[in-house]
Each structure stands twice: as structure tokens, then as C-alpha cells.
Amino acid sequence: MKRFNKSVYSIALAAVAISLTACSDNDNDPVEEIVEVEPVPVVSTYEVSVVNLTAGQPASPIAVALHGSDVALWSVGESSSDGLALLAESGDNTEFLANENLLVTASAEGPTPPGESVVVSISIEDNDMSAMTVASMLGNTNDAFTGFTGMDLSTLEVGDSVTHYTHAYDAGTEANTESAEDVPGPAAGGEGPSEGREAHDFVTLHPGVVTLEGGLSSSVLTNDQRFDNPVLKISVTRME
């Protein structure tokens, strides 16, 4: 009868013991906890610097808005929105900036007198495809406004700047009587907005004011309120 080889038997027992020890150690290893790091929001901040280039037209509080690249707040040949009509007739930008298509809005606190300037800052988070609109009324008119809409911001890097010289538009919502009742600026002090649409009801380039000296008997404007294009210098700088 063969006998067990004690050496082989001892080696086998040792191997089993080592294996059990290894298994025991693995069972006691702490479970590594995976921590999810929230991404830091990317904030884009733009500084909008506006210079009033006219000699006698105060610019109503500058309205600034960020929105999708598919949004335009006016177009030559198209009817003005109610918000644009109110802005162009009275300088009140509240309804204009309440448009549901706008992502972020900002406004200057007050009018910008002729020859002076103002800066408006606006920021947006995590949006690489936004566009900008800037708008203001020429105060000593019936319904003249100026600015730009739908300016692409997607390629503007931090530190980059772009400048626009803007023309005057006629909102087409009020007849250009230049009368004291309808011109809200300091040259007349009227109420501004009128009921309904009195004119051709579509946006055009503004022909300029006629004035009393120019032969418009209803006008309270003088040659001091005349203007040529461009009327505003608008510089947009990406700050962050």
C-alpha cells in the first residue's frame, strides 16, 4: 500500500492557506467611491458701449438683448411688433425686452444725450450660439429708432471687439407730424405713443426730420434736431 507523501501534502495545505488569506484580504478592501464633479458654467459677458453721434437727438435708454441666432426683432419691409412700436414712439423699452424669444436682457438707466456715451453690460451662461440686438429711439421724432438685430456672437473671443455705425429706421407706426403731442423728446415733450397704426405700418430707413424751417407747419422741431446717418456708434466687446 502506498503512503501519503508528507511533503506534498504539506505544500498543498500551505497553498490553500495562502489562497484563503488572499480572498479574505480582497473582501476587506474599501470600495472606491466615484465622485461626480459638476461642470463649471461657462459665462460669457459682453460690454456694449454706445456713443450718440447726433447733435440734437437724445437716444432713449439703450435696450440690449441676447437671443438665438434665428431671432430678428425687426426687418426692413416688415411690420413692427407692438414692443418695437412702443419703443420707437415713446422710448419705453419694457415691452420690447419682454419678448419671449429673448434669453437675457439689459437696459441703460436713462437716455443718452447728443454727443455723450453709455456702457451696458450683459452676461449669459453656457450658450455658444447666441446673437445680440441693440435698440434705441431717437427722442425728438415720432417713431424713429436705431440699432441692429441678430448680430452673431459665436466667433467673438474674449478680448475681441466689433463696432457698428447704425442708421435710423422709421417704425412705420406713427405719421411723421413732428407735432408737440406726438414727439416725446425735450424738443416737444409730448406723450409719444399713439393708438393704432397711423402710417404705412412697415419698417423703412428714416428720411430724417423736416422741421418747421423746412416747411412742415405742424413741426415743433428746428434745424437743431436734424440728423444724418450714422446716428449711433455701438462697440461690443467680449469681456469673459
Image (tube, rainbow, N blue to C red):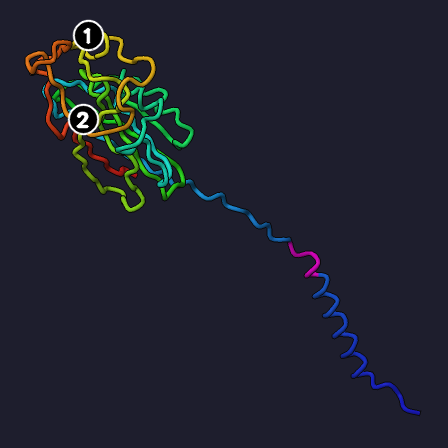
Out of 120 and 197, give the one closest to the viewer. 197
The C terminus sits in image quarter = top left
Out of 99 and 159, give the one closest to the viewer. 99
Residue 37, percent from left and from top: 50, 45
Which amino acid type is shown beneath numbered disc 2?
His
Q: Mark 2 points at which residue?
A: 206
Give the residue at the far bottom of this rendering.
1
Residue at position x 6%, y 13% in the image: 213
Q: In this view, does 107 lie above or below 213?
A: below
The N terminus sits in image quarter = bottom right
Could you say whether the residue bearing mark 2 is in a helix, strand or loop?
A: loop
Write down the quadrant of residue 100 in the picture: top left
Residue at position x 28%, y 27% in the image: 202
| C-alpha separation, residue under disc 2 versus residue under disc 1 | 19 Å
Q: Is residue 117 left or right of residue 125?
A: left
Give the residue at the far right of this rendering.
1
Q: How crowded is mark 1: few (under 14 residues within 10 Å), some or many (20 or more)?
A: many
Q: In this view, does 187 lie above or below 231?
A: above
Residue 107, percent from left and from top: 30, 23
Magenta extent: 25-30
Could you say whether the residue bearing mark 1 is in a helix, strand or loop?
A: loop
Out of 235 and 83, give the one closest to the viewer. 83
Which amino acid type is shown beneath numbered disc 1?
Ala
Q: How crowded is mark 2: few (under 14 residues within 10 Å), some or many (20 or more)?
A: some
Residue 3 lies in the magenta-colored region = no
Residue at position x 21%, y 27% in the image: 169
Q: In this view, does 8 lie to the left or right of 68?
A: right
Write down the quadrant of residue 51 in the picture: top left
Residue at position x 75%, y 67% in the image: 20
Sequence order check, earlier mark of 2 and 1: 1
Q: Name the residue under label 1.
A: 180
